[in-house]
């Protein structure tokens, strides 16, 4: 695999992770300000400056997490969280070596932090988190 392909895979992976984290926040069909704030905080602490790969625009590739999440905030009326989980599962199946144990743990920690940020983890979020855990273990 050449460097350009690796950059494309990493960029797409971070986009899929952004969708996944949005799916957690939107599991109950509502996005709360605390969830957005938690995504921003989690992104800064856990993701920013951890992978120095630049995307095609010269931005850190991990920035795609926040960009996709923000985009989906504007478009969430037509979004189905389970479709995003299915897309993530397909991407992960196509690129299993990218999803190391450390990355999977970071994804789960981020998802749990977002779910817990507004009045604790609710039933819808719990179902979504269980599905994410299942995907990451496969």
Image (tube, rainbow, N blue to C red):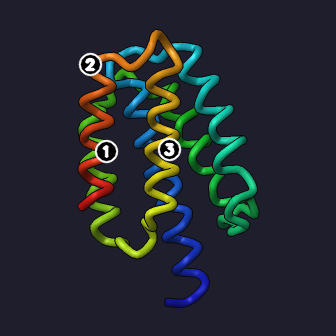
What is the secondary structure assignment of the residue under circle 1? helix
Is residue 55 rendered to the left or right of residue 106? right
Q: Residue at x 44, y 25 (%)?
A: 115
Q: Residue at x 63, y 55 (%)?
A: 62
Quadrant in the rendering for residue 43: top right
Q: Nearer the viewer, residue 30 or 101?
A: 101
Is residue 137 rendered to the left or right of residue 101? left
What is the secondary structure assignment of the residue under circle 3? helix
Up-down: is 120 above or below 21?
A: above
Residue that badge 3 annotates: 18
Q: Earlier in the sequence, mark 1 or mark 2?
A: 2
Is residue 124 rendered to the left or right of residue 117? left
The reply to whether dot 3 and dot 1 touch (C-beta < 8 Å) is no
The reply to whether dot 1 and dot 2 touch (C-beta < 8 Å) is no
Q: Nearer the viewer, residue 116 or 40?
A: 116
In this rendering, the label closer to the viewer, 3 or 1? 1
Up-down: is 72 above or below 100?
A: above
Q: Earlier in the sequence, mark 3 or mark 2?
A: 3
The span from disc 3 to disc 1 (Cα, nearest Å) is 13 Å
Q: Quadrant of the C terminus?
A: bottom left
Q: Position of residue 69 (x, y in %)?
A: 53, 36
Q: Residue at x 68, y 32 (%)?
A: 41
Say which mark, if any, is on residue 132.
1
Quadrant in the rendering for residue 82: top left
At label 2, counting other C-alpha atoms closer than 10 Å, the crowd grade (few under 14, some 14-19, many 20 or more) is few
What is the secondary structure assignment of the residue under circle 2? helix
Counting the numbered discs, the total is 3
């Amino acid at each position: 695999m050449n460097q350009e392909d690796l950059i494309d895979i990493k960029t797409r992976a971070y986009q899929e992770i952004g969708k996944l984290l949005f799916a957690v926040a939107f599991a109950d069909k509502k996005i709360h300000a605390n969830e957005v704030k938690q995504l921003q905080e989690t992104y800064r602490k856990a993701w920013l400056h951890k992978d120095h790969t630049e995307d095609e625009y010269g931005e850190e590739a991990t920035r795609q997490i926040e960009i996709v999440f923000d985009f989906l905030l504007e478009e969430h009326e037509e979004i189905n969280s389970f479709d995003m989980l299915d897309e993530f599962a397909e991407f992960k199946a196509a690129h299993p070596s990218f999803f190391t144990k450390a990355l999977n743990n970071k994804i789960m920690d981020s998802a749990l932090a977002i779910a817990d940020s507004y009045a604790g983890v609710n039933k819808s979020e719990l179902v979504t988190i269980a599905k994410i855990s299942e995907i990451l273990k496969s």
